[in-house]
């Protein structure tokens, strides 16, 4: 759950680093607003489903092909293949029960926070567009 949120917030920032000066300005000045929006969407999804998603890493052994490099009598490299077991890490999603009343309180708090941040975010976007007009 946290990994998805972090990933969802990191990708726009990485893309913004490659964007125009206007895009970077908007991304920099609306980060908290976008973060609250992402959290609010997650909480609303939890309420709609009736549970939250969690993730855990699971180590599983897998039979795979391994190559071994040896030298023959003349010193040339000889590659031999054989089966071997390797540990692989899988990410497994699982359901987490939620308290609907607590989740609704969280949703209401995030909605209030988003409303408080909205006007500042709108002003920041307008200021960025004025400071860095596209096509100029």
Image (cartoon, rainbow, N blue to C red):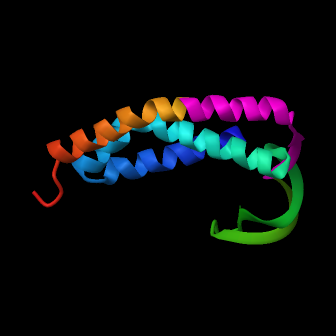
Q: Residue at x 71, y 41 (%)?
A: 43
Q: Is residue 114 left or right of residue 135?
A: right
- Residue nearer the viewer, 29 or 9: 29
- Residue nearer the viewer, 100 or 62: 100
Q: Residue at x 53, y 38 (%)?
A: 35
Locate residue 67, reporting x and y percent: 75, 66
Quarter of the image where one finds residue 108: top right
Q: Is residue 96 left or right of residue 104?
A: right
| Image quarter hosting the C terminus | bottom left
Quick check: 82 above or below 2? below
Quarter of the image where one finds residue 100: top right
Farthest-out residue, left: 136
Locate residue 33, reporting x and y percent: 47, 37
Locate residue 62, reporting x and y percent: 87, 60
Quick check: 70 above or below 14? below
Q: Residue at x 85, y 47 (%)?
A: 50
Locate residue 39, reporting x and y percent: 62, 39
| Image quarter hosting the N terminus | top right
Asked whether residue 94 is drawn in magenta, I would say yes
Q: Is residue 32 left or right of residue 1?
A: left
Q: Residue at x 32, y 52 (%)?
A: 18
Q: Is residue 40 left or right of residue 62?
A: left
Quick check: 21 above or below 68? above
Asked whether residue 134 is drawn in magenta, I would say no
- Residue nearer the viewer, 25 or 40: 40
Q: How many marks?
A: 0
Q: What residue span does the magenta drawing correspond to?
A: 89-112
């Amino acid at each position: 759950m946290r990994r998805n949120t972090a990933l969802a917030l990191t990708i726009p920032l990485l893309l913004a680093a490659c964007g125009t000066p206007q895009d970077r300005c908007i991304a920099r000045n609306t980060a908290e607003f976008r973060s609250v929006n992402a959290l609010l969407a997650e909480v609303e999804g939890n309420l709609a489903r009736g549970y939250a998603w969690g993730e855990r890493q699971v180590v599983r052994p897998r039979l795979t092909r391994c190559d071994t490099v040896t030298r023959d009598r003349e010193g040339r490299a000889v590659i031999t293949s054989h089966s071997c077991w390797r540990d692989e890490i899988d990410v497994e999603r699982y359901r987490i029960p939620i308290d609907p009343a607590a989740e609704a309180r969280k949703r209401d708090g995030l909605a209030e926070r988003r409303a408080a941040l909205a006007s500042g975010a709108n002003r920041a976007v307008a200021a960025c567009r004025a400071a860095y007009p596209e096509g100029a």
